[in-house]
Image (tube, rainbow, N blue to C red):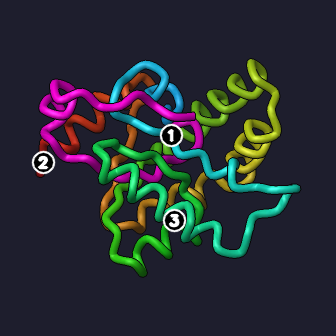
Amino acid sequence: MFGKKATPEIQNYDFLINMIFCGYQGVGKSSICNRENGYIDFESSNFFVNEMRPNAWIDIYINQAVSLNEQGYDVFLSTHKALRDRLNELNIDFTVITPSIDLKEQWIERLSNRYNNNPSLKNMKALKNAEECYEENVKDLCSESKVIMITNADYDLKDCIIEYKGKF
């Protein structure tokens, strides 16, 4: 799902720094894009054709994300390990957004509620992945050099991003 084009006022409010974020499932990528200007949730599941991804999907995904970022958007990507490895290989700056390990039960409940409200294959996969690999996923994401750690289940993603951007 695509967000709305950033206005100069929004960009100024966000310190004129446009970033690429790799956000863990359920952090609110789609929600922020639906209510705010200047953000794009660049959905990786759209790269499946007949239940398969093309061999070069990661490079295509990255090229499109960088282009959208250069046009003035904050771009949200998935957190696939292969994607993050490729971003690092290409020296493309990105920041991971992940919940803390302490939020495991609340996060699984959050993903369960999301699936119950919208029983899509994507939401089912996200829930199953968290149920089976939450701690491993979070530890892996925290190994990246730039991380926004969500430590409270009652948060506003935009506020987290603005606070993070204020450090630059």
Q: Earlier in the sequence, mark 1 or mark 2?
A: 1
> Was residue 14 drawn as part of the magenta stretch in this picture?
yes
Position of residue 134 in the picture relative to residue 160 (left or right): right
Q: Which kind of residue does numbered mark 3 sit on?
A: Asp
Label 3 and label 1: CA atoms lie apart by 22 Å
- Position of 32 relative to 81 (above/below): above
Main SS category, magenta section: loop
Residue 38 location (% of width, % of height): 33, 33
Give the number of the disc on residue 140.
3
In percent of width and height, residue 126 lies at 70, 43
Residue most extreme to the bottom:
89
| Label 1: how many Cα within 10 Å (few below 14, some 14–19, many 20+) | many
Please give the residue where the numbered disc 2 appears in the rendered image. Answer: 167
Which of the pair 37/80 is nearer the observer? 37
Vertical side of 101 occupied by 3: above or below: above
* Segment tinted magenta in the rendering: 1-27
The Cα–Cα distance between marks 2 and 3, rounded to whole angstroms, is 24 Å
Which secondary structure, mark 1? strand
User: Do the numbered discs 3 and 1 sit on residues whose CB atoms are within 8 Å?
Assistant: no
What is the number of the mark on residue 147?
A: none
Q: Mark number for residue 41?
A: 1
Q: Would you call the spot at circle 3 few (<14 residues within 10 Å), some (14-19), or many (20 or more)? A: few
Membership of 149 in magenta stretch? no
Q: What's the residue at 35%, 31% (across, down)?
A: 5
**Circle nearer the N terminus (3, 1):** 1
Quarter of the image where one finds residue 67: bottom left
* Residue depicted at 31% across the width and 65% down the height: 93
Say which quadrant the N terminus sits in: top right
